[in-house]
Image: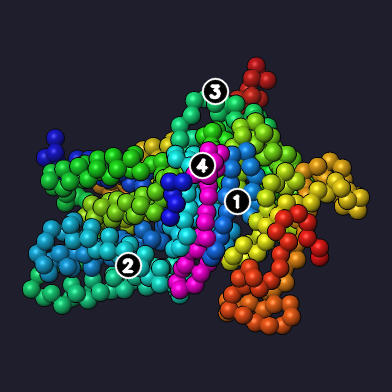
């Protein structure tokens, strides 16, 4: 079944989207979108270091992304610059250092574009195994962290005084983000990872009455976007990563409309009933 | 450190000479405070006077740098945070809010919502509630845990006058029914809840403490507040003979400046009413 590169891409993409959905919800609830972007941008530095020290790419990216979140925490404690400015500095300097390092390493040929925009059509069966094992780990941990994370999203003080550990759970959450970014890089690329986290979650908002429903809906919408995007890219011969993001965006735009549509549907059915 | 010795079985929290230091500055120092079951203690003080720091130290969320805090074994805390800004993207209705830090059976949830008078808002999204309704929802969430101690951080902030009176009445009812202790934080220096047993005025240290003066006994204020309000609101008249300078030193009424304002340096009426 996994012989076909396209099937592998769809399976891999869906696995990633299912993982990204609930994580993305927390990212938008906690307004961490820019933080996610920063982590993602630092991935290129991770790639460069992984090549330099000859370690596994995913491991390298994970370590650097985790280090960035620790660096941010340290800089925030120091005070002075706002988090926004600090993120801007970290985000682009890590990306730039990564690019410069790659340029220096003339002995290796690195396909920069595939790291920036991903190459989902090149996933191997081994990659799929990593995506699903990593995804299961992330979702399992998130289940465990769900209550303290959600409570501290509402109020850190509340969570703290009622015996939960908001700081610890937030740190663990950031590690999960680093892990997802490390896994996702190969599929959608450094520049587009955050969109896969955020857009399905934002789309899900309209259809959810509880945080849990939203997380589930985001997963399903993400999987839908991946499928749609990949088929679109096959049909129109467009780059696969960006096509997935465009598909997610189309779903988001559609999600803005249905409330009104549904109402007018009801009205028309009512008028029909009146007429009959 | 006399953690073991409990002067009374009703004692929930006992702080002795507590000081919290951050970045080389004492946020609060020399705090003596205790809360007994069934007692209402109101912490007042200007912004930055260390009310929240004191409350956090009392709850054990913050570790004091000097002095000791003893808490009743397995003290169960219900916390009502300050006015919250919950992101619109978080779908959270009142019913789901109730189980934020702990699961509760549906019957208990209905009971708690009934007790604070918002059963009709069970399915309402918290972002759509008015200030008073939201405070009630937060109160319901706190009391459903059957706490020994209820910590209320500025519960009437952003609530109109009639709403404040109603909320204070509700808080008194909760105390009467459950017998829990209440630690109430307020930035209003002069109007406090009438049923407060002790008012503690903070400004980096305990400036003064006392019992509020019933509004009902003063014809003038009775006219101002109206009879209904006069039963729930009270005045805390106090006059400080010193001001805290930005550099941490203290200026006394007679113009002298000192490093600290130890109790010997100025006179406070320790209880009852003080003259302006």
Task: Give the magenta-colored segment's residue range.
Answer: B6-28
Q: Which residue is mark 2?
A: A71
Q: Which residue is mark 3?
A: B107
Q: Going 58% across and 54% down the picture, which residue do you hit?
A: B33
Is the Cβ of the residue at disc 1 closer than 8 Å to that at disc 3? no
Where disc 1 sits, the SS reads strand
Closest to the camera, between mark 2 and mark 1, is 1
Quote the CA–CA distance across marks 4 and 3.
21 Å
Closest to the camera, between mark 2 and mark 3, is 3
Quote the CA–CA distance across marks 1 and 3.
27 Å
Q: Which residue is mark 1?
A: B153
* Host chain of mark 3: B
**Which sits earlier in the primary sequence, circle 4 or circle 3?**
4
Q: Are marks 2 and 4 on the same chain?
A: no
Q: Residue furthest top?
A: A276
Q: Are marks 1 and 3 on the same chain?
A: yes
Foreground residue among A182 and B163: B163
Is the Cβ of the residue at disc 2 closer than 8 Å to that at disc 3? no
- How crowded is the residue under tag 3: few (<14 C-alpha within 10 Å), some, or many (20+)? few
Where disc 2 sits, the SS reads helix
Closest to the camera, between mark 1 and mark 3, is 1
Is the Cβ of the residue at disc 2 closer than 8 Å to that at disc 4? no
Q: Going 68% across and 83% down the picture, which residue do you hit?
A: B256
Q: Main secondary structure of the magenta part?
A: strand
- How crowded is the residue under tag 2: few (<14 C-alpha within 10 Å), some, or many (20+)? some
Query: Residue A2, percent across and down?
Result: 14, 39
Query: Residue A9, percent across and down?
Result: 21, 45
């Amino acid at each position: 079944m996994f012989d076909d590169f396209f099937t592998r891409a769809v399976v891999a993409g869906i696995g990633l989207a299912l993982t990204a959905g609930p994580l993305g919800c927390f990212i938008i609830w906690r307004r961490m979108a820019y933080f996610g972007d920063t982590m993602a941008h630092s991935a290129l530095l991770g790639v460069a270091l992984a090549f330099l020290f000859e370690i596994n790419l995913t491991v390298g990216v994970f370590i650097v992304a985790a280090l960035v979140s620790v660096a941010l925490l340290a800089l925030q404690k120091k005070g002075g610059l706002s988090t926004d400015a600090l993120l801007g500095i970290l985000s682009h300097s890590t990306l730039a250092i990564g690019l410069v390092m790659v340029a220096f390493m003339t002995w290796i040929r690195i396909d920069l574009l595939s790291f920036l925009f991903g190459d989902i059509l090149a996933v191997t069966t081994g990659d799929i195994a990593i995506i699903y094992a990593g995804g299961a780990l992330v979702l399992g941990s998130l289940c465990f962290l769900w209550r303290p994370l959600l409570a501290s999203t509402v109020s850190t003080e509340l969570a703290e005084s009622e015996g939960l550990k908001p700081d610890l759970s937030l740190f663990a959450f950031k590690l999960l983000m680093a892990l997802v970014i490390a896994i996702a890089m190969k599929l959608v690329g450094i520049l587009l990872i955050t969109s896969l986290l955020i857009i399905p979650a934002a789309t899900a908002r309209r259809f959810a009455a509880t945080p849990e429903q939203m997380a589930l809906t985001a997963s399903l919408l993400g999987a839908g976007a991946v499928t749609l995007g990949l088929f679109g890219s096959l049909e129109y011969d467009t780059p696969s990563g960006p096509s997935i993001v465009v598909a997610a965006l189309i779903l988001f735009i559609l999600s803005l409309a249905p409330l009104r549509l549904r109402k007018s549907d009801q009205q028309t059915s009512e008028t029909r009933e009146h007429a009959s | 450190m006399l953690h073991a010795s409990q002067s009374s079985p009703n004692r929930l929290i006992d702080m002795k000479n507590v000081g919290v230091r951050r970045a080389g500055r004492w946020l609060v120092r020399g705090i003596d405070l205790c809360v007994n079951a069934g007692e209402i203690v109101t912490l007042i003080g200007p912004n930055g006077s260390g009310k929240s720091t004191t409350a956090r130290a009392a709850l054990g969320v913050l570790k004091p740098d000097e002095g000791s805090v003893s808490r009743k074994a397995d003290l169960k805390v219900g916390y009502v945070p300050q006015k919250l800004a919950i992101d619109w993207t978080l779908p959270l209705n009142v019913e789901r809010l109730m189980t934020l830090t702990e699961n509760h059976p549906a019957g208990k949830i209905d009971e708690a919502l009934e007790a604070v008078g918002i059963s009709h808002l069970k399915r309402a999204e918290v972002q759509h509630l008015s200030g008073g309704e939201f405070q009630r929802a937060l109160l319901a969430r706190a009391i459903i845990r059957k706490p020994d101690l209820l910590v209320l951080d500025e519960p009437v902030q952003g609530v109109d006058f009639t709403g404040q009176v109603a909320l204070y009445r509700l808080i008194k009812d909760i105390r009467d029914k459950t017998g829990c202790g209440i630690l109430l934080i307020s930035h209003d220096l002069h109007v406090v809840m009438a049923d407060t047993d002790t008012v503690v005025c903070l400004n980096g240290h305990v400036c003064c403490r006392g019992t509020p003066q019933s509004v009902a006994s003063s014809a003038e204020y009775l006219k101002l507040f109206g009879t209904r309000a006069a039963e729930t609101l009270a005045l805390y008249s106090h006059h400080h003979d010193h001001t805290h300078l930005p550099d941490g030193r203290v200026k006394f009424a007679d113009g002298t400046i000192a490093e600290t304002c130890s109790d010997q340096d100025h006179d406070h009426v320790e209880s009852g009413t003080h003259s302006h």
